[in-house]
Amino acid sequence: MEKSKKGLLVVFLIVFISMIAIGLSKPALTFKVKSLEMGSSFLSLKIGLLTSMFMIFRAIGSAIFTKIKRKRITATFGFIIFSLCFTAYNLSDNYAVIVLLKPLEGLSPG
């Protein structure tokens, strides 16, 4: 396989895996927040704010990281940060930790 095709395959796999993780995290977010905030009001608002923070920081990260020349290193580094944030977010038992991790998760892949 040529070097350029191999690099393209790596980028495709990184994007594919992170999009699957994002798609699976949206339904899980509802259950995670619901289990942390038992009997709390404004559950829908909290979930909407977390999702909005993720998307806003995703747009900011895209604007910042498109100007960097070394795309492969940026994508790999972003994927590692995204994976660590996603894992920490799923293991957290505190709503404040999720609020801090969601923007970083959105910013990281760029």
Image (spheres, helix red, strand yellow):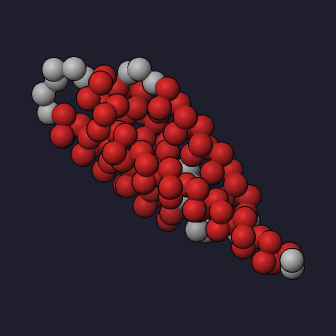
Which image quarter holds the C terminus?
A: bottom right
Residue under the image location 24 percent in, 45 percent down: 48
| 2 sits left or right of 57 in the view | right
Please tell me whether residue 49 is drawn above or below residue 20 in the rendered image: above
Place residue 96 in its image quadrant: top left
Place residue 84 in its image quadrant: top right
Please tell me whether residue 107 is drawn above or below residue 39 in the rendered image: below
Q: How far from the left and from the top, in percent, is residue 61?
A: 50, 57
| 20 sits left or right of 93 in the view | right
Residue under the image location 72 percent in, 73 percent down: 8
Please tell me whether residue 13 is drawn above or below residue 48 in the rendered image: below
Q: How far from the left and from the top, in percent, is residue 11?
A: 68, 66
Q: How far from the left and from the top, in percent, is residue 102?
A: 42, 41
Residue under the image location 29 percent in, 38 percent down: 30
| 40 sits left or right of 109 in the view | left
Q: How far from the left and from the top, in percent, is residue 16?
A: 57, 62
Which image quarter holds the N terminus?
A: bottom right
Tag count:
0
For the question of whether residue 66 can be seen, the reply is yes
Please tell me whether residue 62 is drawn above or below residue 107 in the rendered image: below
For the question of whether residue 107 can be seen, the reply is no
Residue under the image location 68 percent in, 50 percent down: 77
